[in-house]
Amino acid sequence: MNIHSRDLRLARLCNEALDEPMTAAEREIMIGEAAQKLEELFDVLRIDHRNDHNTRDTPRRVAKMYVEEILQGRYTAPPAITEFDNVQAYDQLLVTGPIELRSTCAHHLLPIYGAAYIGILPAAEGKIIGLSKYDRIVEHFASRLQIQEELVKQIGQYIMDVTKPRGLAVRICAVHMCKTQRGVRASRRSRMVNTYYWGEIAASAELKSEFLQECAALVLNAE
Ligand SMILES: [Zn+2]
């Protein structure tokens, strides 16, 4: 099947998933079509990929990287969440991080890399989810063309929708290579930090400050 026949699937924002996950066979077709376009791009840029040993397989390699890695969070389903009963009715703030964050900027197609921190205020009568799932959720939403302001909200909204905690906080601290590698060529130490809150954490200055203090402690421990 030709990918272009699926007009609906083309009408999504760059950091939204398609209506339905693609099958492996559909992704293989997409890789082939993208590789052809990359060959054309190389031709335009006067890169002789047919004769140059360094770039001979680069169009296909890059096409595969986009479909299977850089953008895979648009084409595959979000990670399944393993839920456990909150037997001890744990209802205090828990914070996990740093979670490795690797994404790609929607404006320049350059890497965004850094760390995410997630604070959860579980509902005593609700479910709790396996800790490693937070890493998988971050990876899923980061594997799209992103801007950091929207990424932070996508990660948090998904956790809110699926696990319904009393409160949630998501913080990202990241280097944007479109700012360090080009443009103003800022220092690689230049980062962007943003935090978004939901539910009871959003309404409580005390919980926000507890979350931020735990993040600072986790940063120190990670160094
Ligand atoms: Zn950018």
Image (spheres, grey):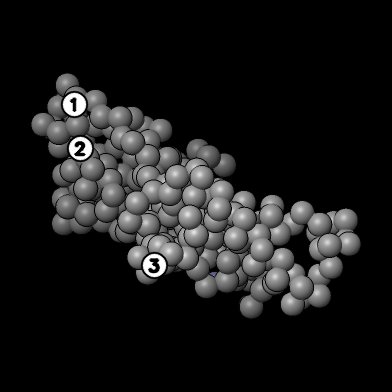
> Residue at point 25% right, 29% down?
83
Label placed on residue 124: none
> Residue at point 69% right, 55% down?
60
Mark 2 vs mark 3: which is more N-terminal? Answer: 3
Secondary structure beneath dot 1 equals: loop
Mark 1: give few (<14), some (14-19) or many (20+) Cα within 10 Å: some
- Distance from label 3 to label 1 (Cα)? 44 Å
Secondary structure beneath dot 3 equals: helix
Tell me how many marks there are: 3
Label placed on residue 122: 2
Q: Is mark 3 within 8 Å of ligand 1?
A: no
Secondary structure beneath dot 2 equals: loop
**Residue 204 appears in the rendering:** no
> Residue at point 50% right, 43% down?
24
Q: Is residue 11 left or right of residue 34?
A: left
- Distance from label 2 to label 3 (Cα)? 41 Å
Which-is-in-front pick, marks 3 and 1?
3
Quadrant for the C terminus in the image: top right
Instruction: Measuring from the top left, give residue 112's x and y in whole percent.
Output: 55, 59
What kind of residue is marked 1? Answer: Asn
- Location of residue 73 with respect to 38 vertically, above or below: above
What kind of residue is marked 3? Answer: Asp
- Location of residue 132 with respect to 77 vertically, above or below: above
Q: Quadrant of ligand 1?
A: bottom right
Query: Is there a contact, CB below 8 Å, between mark 2 and mark 1?
Result: yes
Label placed on residue 86: 1
Instruction: Measuring from the top left, give residue 129's x and y in whole percent.
Output: 28, 32
Instruction: Measuring from the top left, give residue 121's x and y in whole percent.
Output: 22, 41
- 208 or 40, which is in the foreground? 40
